[in-house]
Amino acid sequence: MSLDRADVEKIAHLARLALSEEEANGLAVDLSRILDLVAQMNQVETGGVDPMAHPLDMVQRLRPDKVTESDQREKFQSVAPMTDQGLYLVPRVLE
């Protein structure tokens, strides 16, 4: 599929993009090449191919779900400017 400059200008208008003449001509060529590649990929026979979640046949190792660090909230909040009932207080941003 080939796009011309008018097609690119129409797409740019819909996307609210300002393009120069050089950019429009360059994008017409680039987008045409991309669409040609997609058309070429669509011609490949994939009927007997099972979909894959990942190209490698591996299993992710999982770590045991157990606590490895102690509760340090008191230590961290001791240096905070303002806290209340275990929460950090910050200045209001929106009025």
Image (cartoon, rainbow, N blue to C red):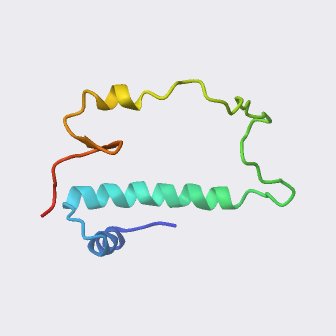
Q: State the image quarter where residue 18 is shown.
A: bottom left
The residue closer to the viewer here, 94 or 62, is 94
Q: Is residue 78 left or right of residue 42?
A: left
Q: State the image quarter where residue 55 is shown.
A: top right
Q: State the image quarter where residue 92 is shown.
A: bottom left
Image quadrant containing the C terminus:
bottom left
Against 76, is 30 above or below? below
Q: Is residue 9 left or right of residue 65?
A: left
Q: Is residue 52 left or right of residue 41?
A: right
Tell which residue pokes out farthest to the right in this image. Answer: 48
Residue 15 image offset from top left, x and y in percent: 30, 70
Which residue is found at the position 19% from the left and 35% from the top? 81
Tell which residue pokes out farthest to the left in this image. Answer: 95
Residue 63 image offset from top left, x and y in percent: 70, 29
Against 25, is 73 above or below? above
Residue 1 image offset from top left, x and y in percent: 52, 67
Which residue is found at the position 21% from the left and 62% from the top? 19
Which residue is found at the position 75% from the left and 35% from the top? 56
Residue 73 image offset from top left, x and y in percent: 40, 32
Q: How many marks?
A: 0
Q: Is residue 68 left or right of residue 12?
A: right
The residue closer to the viewer here, 36 or 57, is 57
Which residue is found at the position 24% from the left and 46% from the top? 89
